[in-house]
Image: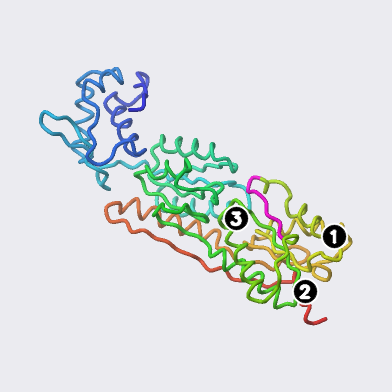
Amino acid sequence: MKKKRINDQDINPKYQQLINIIMNLIKQGHFKKGDKLPSETELINEYSVSRNTVRLALDKLVSTGLLYKKQGQGTFFAGIKSNNLSRSSLIGVILPCVTHSIFPYVVRGIENVAHDRHYSVIIGDTNVDNTKELQILERMIARNIDGLVIEPTNSAYATMESEIYKRLKKLTIPYMFVESTIADLEVSSLIIDDELGGFLATEYAIKKGHRRIAHVYKSDNICGIRRDQGYCKALKQYGIPYDEKLVKPYLEKDEVDIVGNKFTKELLALNTQRPTAIIFFNDEGALQSYTAIKEAGLKIPDDISVIGFDNINVSSTTEVPLTTLEHPKYNLGKWAADILIDEIENFDNRVKTNLVIKPTLIERKSVRDLNLG
């Protein structure tokens, strides 16, 4: 068992502190159903408590059905049921960048539902750092969270060999994915049909007469990869050759920089080979391109067309309202919170929910119809 001292200054009695330690280790996945716990003597030596304290803690846990005893053999883990594991009414939320793009809306949706259902939310921002992601998860588990909503960092690289996969696999509490998933972890998820989104954006530009269409996307994020697949699928379906000069992948960690401005300048520098339309991974990148286009002495959409993704509030109020794809954002957070809390509160009969939301294109003023001449 992981060493953790009993605190003499804690207002909780020592037996309750020991109960909390054992329950936390169970939530962390240190015991499987049927595993034997350390003996009374081992617990006494490990936590420097009396035999009476150990027996009282174990008897309390046995009375809940979480543990059971075999005469002369010891104490064993009975497995988790909804009525034998106390709740903290805390939900963990781990995201790559809480303040960026859609995530403030998602968090607000989660928090509003959690509040209405008498839960509190702990937010963890990984800053696109896998090591930090694991550390945040461990700290949340140590706080005895009842469930977890997570978008994995660098989701395109999350495999069965990755540390986050191994740690999530051990969790005994309900958890679910939003936006991105990790293959082979069969839990609830709420994702967007990103391949369809990439296809719809590209098809729209094509139907407006564009043939040189650029794509700026996150290449280490499974959402970005799927949108690029949709982009390529639309080009192929409409017989437009793929041009690697028009494709600008970037890493999720670089999104804090002004990638939309940077890549727009690179694309405009192609001069006669420059694109007539640029599709961006999100609205923030698309709106950053406006400055680069203006600095080049060009106009949207007269000289170059721009398409975003997410439909954030400012996209409709900018000087040239942005054509984009709708993302449920706030509702995504609400739905995720409801799904997770239902799983927490119906632990014995929880049902896995996997929703794929189809994006819709919102036509505004940032794309020129070249068919009109």
- For the question of whether residue 325 can be seen, the reply is no
Q: Is residue 56 left or right of residue 4?
A: left
- Membership of 231 in magenta stretch: no
Percent across and percent down for residue 191 are 50, 60
**The furthest residue to the bottom:** 372
Q: Residues within 10 Å of mark 3 (few under 14, many from 20)?
A: many
Nearer-N-terminus badge (3/1): 3
Residue under numbered circle 3: 102
Percent across and percent down for residue 125 are 56, 42
Q: Which of the two residues, 54 or 112, is positioned nearer the viewer here? A: 54
Instruction: Give the residue at x 71% y 56%.
Output: 248
Residue under numbered circle 2: 368
> What distance separates the C-alpha of mark 1 from that of mark 2?
16 Å
> What distance separates the C-alpha of mark 3 from that of mark 2?
26 Å
Q: Is residue 209 left or right of residue 232?
A: right
Q: How many numbered discs sit on the rendered protein?
A: 3
Look at the image and give the residue range highlighted in magenta.
247-253
Q: Residues within 10 Å of mark 2 (few under 14, many from 20)?
A: many
Residue under numbered circle 1: 294
Instruction: Give the residue at x 56% y 59%.
Output: 329
Q: Amino acid at mark 3?
A: Ile
- Membership of 251 in magenta stretch: yes
Secondary structure found at label 1: helix
Percent across and percent down for residue 326 are 60, 66
Instruction: Give the residue at x 77% y 58%.
Output: 289
Nearer-N-terminus badge (1/2): 1
Nearer-N-terminus badge (3/2): 3
